[in-house]
Image (tube, rainbow, N blue to C red):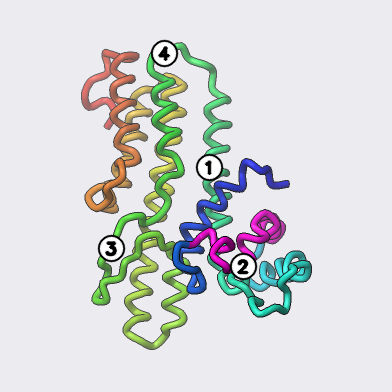
Amino acid sequence: MLAELDVPDYLKEIREQVCSRCVERPLGGPPCAPLGKQCGVELHLRQLIESIHEVDSGSMMPYLEHNRAGICEHCAFLHSSICPCPMDYLSALIVEAVECVDRRRERRAHVTQLIDSLSEQSDVGLEEIDDVYEEATGTWTLCDWPTHFGPDGLNLQGMVSSQAKGIAVESAGTQRAETWSRAACWLAEVERFAAKAECEAALAVAAAKAGEWRQALLHARRAWAYEFATGRPLRNQRPRTWLNLTLVIDKVARANAPVMDEGGGD
C-alpha cells in the first residue's frame, strides 16, 4: 500500500521526466487541472503508481492493460473528448519514472540496513558524514546538465538512455537514428557511472561506521572519481555530489586515525 508521504517523491520525478515532455501541457503547467486541462496522471496519480507496482514486465502492454482495466474503466472522463489522456500515451515514461524512484528507494533502504547492522561507534564526526551522505544520495542518477551532443547538438539534460533508444528505434534508417543511438549509449554510461558512484559512497559510509578509515576514504574517492569522469562537475552548476563526502571523510578519518599516512587511502 502506497503511503501518503511517499507520493511527493513520485510526483516530483514524474513532473521532471514525464510532464516536461507532454505536448498537451498548457502554458504554466503542471499542475494542469487549474489551467483547464484534465489529465489522468494528476487525477489518478496514487492509483497509477500502485497499478505500476502490481506489474513486473519487460514490455509495456501488461502495464497498459492493467492501467486501463483498473483505472481508465472507472474514470469519469472515459470516452469523453479528452480520452485518451496523456496517462495513456506517456505510459512508458511514467513507468520509467516510477521505477526510477523505486530503485532509488531500494538503494537507500539497503544502505540504511547495512549501516544499522554495524555496531555503533563513538568516533567524532560520524554524524557529519551521515548528514553529507543523506544530502547527496539519490541526487545524481542521470545526465542533469545541458549538452550539445552530436552533429544535431542534442540537449540530453534530464533524459534517460531508454528514451534515447526509443527515439533511435522510431527514426530507424536515418542519420537522426544514428545520433540518437550514440546518445543512448552515452546516457547509459552516465547512468552506470552514477550507480557505481552511489554504491561506492554507500560503502564509504559503511566503512566509516566500522572504523575502517582507509577503506572509507578509498570508496569515497572512487565515488568522486566516477562523477568526475563523466565531466558532470565541469558542466553543472549544482554542488559536486560526492566531492563533499570525500572531503568530510578525509577530515574525520584524520581526526580518528591520525597515524594514517597520505597515501593510505589510495
Per the rendering, the mark at residue 147 is 3
- Tag 3 secondary structure: loop
Pick the front one: 189 or 73: 73
- Tag 4 secondary structure: loop
Mark 4 Cα within 10 Å, few/some/many (few <14, many 20+)? some
Residue 243 sits in which quadrant?
top left
Q: Residue at x 30, y 41 (%)?
A: 239
Q: Residue at x 57, y 37 (%)?
A: 109
- Tag 1 secondary structure: helix
Taking 175 as reference, is 17 above or below it?
above
Pointers 2 and 3 in contact (CB under 8 A)?
no
First in sequence: mark 3 vs mark 1: 1
Residue at the disc numbered 4? 123
Closest to the camera, between mark 2 and mark 4, is 2
Q: Is residue 95 magenta?
A: no
Residue at the disc numbered 2? 38
Residue at the disc numbered 1? 107
First in sequence: mark 2 vs mark 3: 2
Pick the front one: 101 or 7: 7
**Label 4 sits on what residue type?**
Asp
User: In the image, residue 160 lies at what x, y percent?
Assistant: 43, 62
Residue 20 shows in the view? yes
Q: Residue at x 27, y 68 (%)?
A: 149
- In the rendered image, which quarter contains the C terminus? top left
Residue 257 sits in which quadrant?
top left
First in sequence: mark 2 vs mark 4: 2
Alpha carbon of mark 2 to alpha carbon of mark 1: how far?
35 Å
Residue 95 shows in the view? no
Pointers 2 and 4 in contact (CB under 8 A)?
no
